[in-house]
């Protein structure tokens, strides 16, 4: 009995740690899924074509839609939310008591030089609702120009209720290489996160 209890405590510690679970490929089959455009609140959203005269641009911390996903151009301007970053989106859902893996499926809408240059999107996830303590964790999602990947963290929900899941993108990056003055063409790379979907999946293992 003592051995089993010790093992349960060990598993709980692992699940509740801040270690991010970054995975190749998209996550499917979750209990709750919200597409990128299913946000409840957002830092800024423009439904039209980016970079037109009507577009408020990044001074409005703006996201844009493409299919069922949302993407942004760069993280500058506007009122800061966390760590000097202003691009965020909130998704709501009814969650029940237990441990939930909460994360997102994402892809780059731009051009990444290499995995060494930009290995992963870093996204701060905050759970807003009736929790024992503020729950904020950083998720890492492998970055790719041509394939959706996912990342998640474990969160402990104690009471049934409507919770807000807020995502804030933390690590925008762009860089140019080469020089026209040297006779070579300048090559530029740009990271623009696109949220394909957000998922919430409750653990149903024997430990609970």
Image: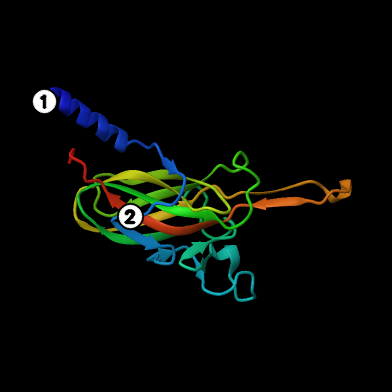
Q: Is residue 79 left or right of residue 162?
A: right
Q: How is the image coloured?
A: rainbow
**Percent coordinates x, y for residue 111 in the rendering:** 64, 53
Q: Quadrant of the C terminus?
A: top left
Q: Quadrant of the N terminus?
A: top left
**Percent coordinates x, y for residue 55 in the rendering:** 59, 72
Q: Is residue 81 visible?
A: no
Q: Examine the rendered structure and indicate whether residue 117 appears above or below residue 9.
A: below
Question: Element type at marker 1?
Answer: loop
Q: Residue at x 31, y 33 (%)?
A: 14
Q: Is residue 76 left or right of residue 137?
A: right
- Lower sequence index among marks 2 and 1: 1
Q: Can you identify the residue that label 1 sits on? A: 1
Q: Is residue 110 left or right of residue 165?
A: right
Front-most of 60 and 117? 117
| Disc 2 crowd, CA 10 A, few/some/many (<14, 14-19, 20+) | few
Q: Residue 78 appears in which quarter of the rendering?
A: bottom right
Which residue is situated farthest in the left direction here? Answer: 1
Q: Can you identify the residue that label 2 sits on? A: 29
Q: Is residue 148 visible?
A: yes
């Amino acid at each position: 009995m003592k051995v089993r209890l010790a093992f349960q405590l060990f598993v709980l510690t692992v699940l509740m740690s801040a270690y991010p679970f970054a995975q190749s490929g998209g996550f499917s089959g979750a209990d709750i899924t919200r597409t990128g455009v299913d946000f409840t609140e957002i830092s800024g959203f423009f439904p039209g074509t980016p970079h037109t005269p009507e577009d408020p641009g990044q001074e409005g911390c703006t996201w844009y839609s493409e299919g069922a996903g949302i993407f942004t151009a760069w993280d500058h301007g506007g009122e800061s939310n966390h760590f000097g970053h202003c691009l965020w989106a909130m998704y709501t859902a009814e969650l029940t008591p237990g441990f939930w893996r909460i994360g997102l499926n994402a892809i780059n809408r731009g051009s990444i030089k290499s995995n060494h240059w930009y290995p992963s999107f870093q996204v701060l996830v905050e759970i807003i609702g009736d929790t024992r303590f503020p729950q904020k964790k950083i998720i890492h999602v492998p970055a790719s120009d041509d394939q959706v990947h996912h990342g998640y963290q474990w969160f402990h929900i104690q009471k049934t209720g409507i919770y807000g899941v807020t995502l804030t993108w933390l690590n925008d990056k762009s860089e140019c290489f080469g020089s026209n003055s040297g006779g070579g063409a300048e090559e530029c790379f740009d990271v623009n996160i696109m949220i394909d979907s957000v998922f919430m999946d409750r653990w149903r293992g024997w430990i609970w």
